[in-house]
Image (cartoon, grey):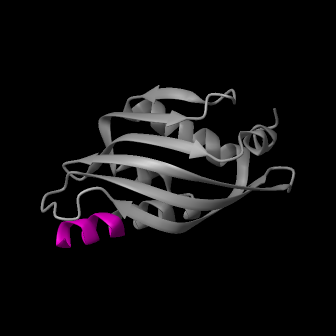
Amino acid sequence: MIGAIIGAKLVRSQYDRLNRGDIETFMAGIADDATFIYPSNVSVGGEIKGKKAIDEWFHKLMEHYSKISITLKNVFVANVLALGSTNVFAVEWNEIATNRDGKDFKFSGVTIIEVRRGKATRIQEYVYDTNILKKAWGE
């Protein structure tokens, strides 16, 4: 149970880093061979493989939005008895993203994060209303 508590705290820290725009520290928690999956109904969506490509994607995110504010509603842990640094987390969140034109977009979703040896190896975003997501990306 201690491992699950520590893991959930690390997940929350990663979202705090995103809210601050601290991509470099955020990327330290991503495995070299990680995969990031973002809703494919937007041009930046799809399956992004490898730490370098994921880093580029998150830099593009920060370039597109002048501010993001992600509020975590719940963090669920698949294996609460895990002692090591391997687990799966489900994060329910609300986000307000402000684009460079100053327009706010509000959306919600769930992210599934697979962690192995303390680093995210697979991250998949599920957004509840992808029409808002498209508008937020200017599409």
Q: Residue 19: percent from the left, percent from the top? A: 57, 63
Asked if residue 31 lies in the magenta stretch, the reply is: no
In the image, 129 versus 56, the foreground residue is: 129
Q: Residue 89: percent from the left, percent from the top? A: 36, 55
Residue 47 vertical position relative to residue 17 in the rendered view, above or below: above
Q: Is residue 103 visible?
A: yes
Name the residue rendered at 81%, 50% in the picture: 100
Q: Which residues are magenta?
A: 1-9
Q: Residue 56: percent from the left, percent from the top? A: 52, 35
Residue 131, picture quadrant: top right
Asked if residue 8 lies in the magenta stretch, the reply is: yes
Name the residue rendered at 63%, 62% in the picture: 94
Question: Image quadrant for the N terminus?
Answer: bottom left
In the rendered structure, the answer to whether residue 130 lies left or right of residue 49 reads right
Q: Is residue 68 visible?
A: no
Q: Residue 113: percent from the left, percent from the top? A: 38, 48
Name the residue rendered at 81%, 41% in the picture: 135
The tally of labels here is 0
In the rendered structure, the answer to whether residue 16 lies left or right of residue 7 reads right
Q: Main secondary structure of the magenta part?
A: helix
Residue 77 vertical position relative to residue 47 in the rendered view, above or below: below
In the image, 41 versus 99, the foreground residue is: 41
In the image, 91 versus 43, the foreground residue is: 91
Residue 129, picture quadrant: top right
Name the residue rendered at 60%, 34% in the picture: 39
Question: Image quadrant for the C terminus?
Answer: top right
Q: Residue furthest left?
A: 83
